Image (cartoon, rainbow, N blue to C red):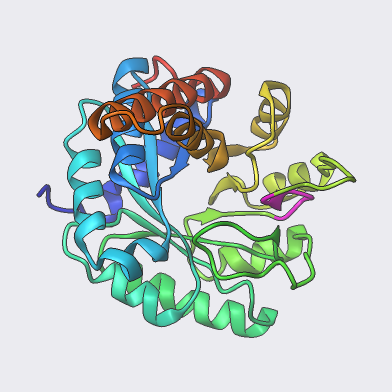
Amino acid sequence: MVPRPPLSENRSMSILNKALAEGYAVPGMCCYNIESIIATVKAAEAARSPAMVLLFPWAIQYAGDSLVKAAADAAHNASVPVSLHLDHCQTPELVRRAADIPEGFDSIMCDMSHYEKEENLKLTAELVKYCHERGIAAEAEPGRIEGGEDGVAETADLEGLLTTPEEAEEFVATGIDMLAPAFGNVHGEYGPRGIQLEYDRLDAINKKVGDRVRLVLHGADPFDEEIFRKCMAGGVTKVNINKGMNNHYAWVQEEMRGKPLTSVIEAGTLAMQKAIEKYMHWLGSAGKA
């Protein structure tokens, strides 16, 4: 295992700070199994792109430290910069549990967005301190991004609350390194109303806090290159992708039902790798490693 560097040399922040300086964004791939982790690393190496492997708390609930350690090993031994991030960690206990895994996560999303704002801010500040003491960067979500996502505690019944620049400032004061604004983006399906993003809101948030935190885009699965470019113009440097990768694995499993398992795994991994490489070209990170 590769030791975790101090916070000043944090892998996730090094990757995102370079992206901001050079005007591109980095894909954060939501991984559920070893195949998606390997696909992310292989895509990064093939495209000479930085990348972030994202796990959900489900990975710890399902496999203890095992999947985390495998992901850390794959990410940190890649020939290009790849970091390991824990997405949507929704209880203080789980954040601490994850932060205490040796040589594991480079960054953790302390997602207390299901609490009322004051409690959200209080808990986030406490958890950011806990993470920073261990060299781990922290992400938080002011407001509340609508919808639900596989592997995340269901918040679809909670009303989405859009982020204001003032709220963003309050969250920056907790010490976070990454901020995930809610500006019309939705976890999961966008439904009949379609994609309606408030780019002016994103721009205002970026102008307010973009010099101190890196902005993260959630709910990006159905977006095309044009939408990504507009979000990047608003300061986004990390783009979380879930179904845009994982659906390719499911399709291969369906097509190759009954074939030898190794061939299904390899074909599924390759299909995900190719999908990830497409995002790397769209986001401008290809060739930047």
Which of the image's four quarters has the C terminus? Answer: top left
Q: Range of the magenta residues?
A: 182-188
Residue 97, percent across and down? 30, 75
| Depth check, front residue: 150 or 225 | 150
Residue 102, percent across and down? 16, 64
Q: Residue at x 55, y 70 (%)?
A: 153
| Depth check, front residue: 28 or 107 | 28
Looking at the image, the residue that sits furthest to the right is: 193
Q: Is residue 210 above or below residue 267?
A: below
| Depth check, front residue: 178 or 66 | 66
Looking at the image, the residue that sits furthest to the front is: 258
Q: How many marks?
A: 0
Residue 89, percent across and down? 46, 68
Residue 187 in magenta?
A: yes
Residue 1 in magenta?
A: no
Picture quadrant of residue 51:
top left
Q: Residue at x 45, y 40 (%)?
A: 29
| Depth check, front residue: 72 or 259 | 259
Q: Residue at x 28, y 44 (%)?
A: 34
Picture quadrant of residue 277:
top left
Q: Is residue 12 above or below residue 121?
A: above
Report whether 167 appears left or right of 88. right
Residue 240, percent across and down? 54, 43
Q: Is residue 64 above or below residue 20?
A: below
Q: Main secondary structure of the magenta part?
A: loop
Report whether 74 appears left or right of 156. left
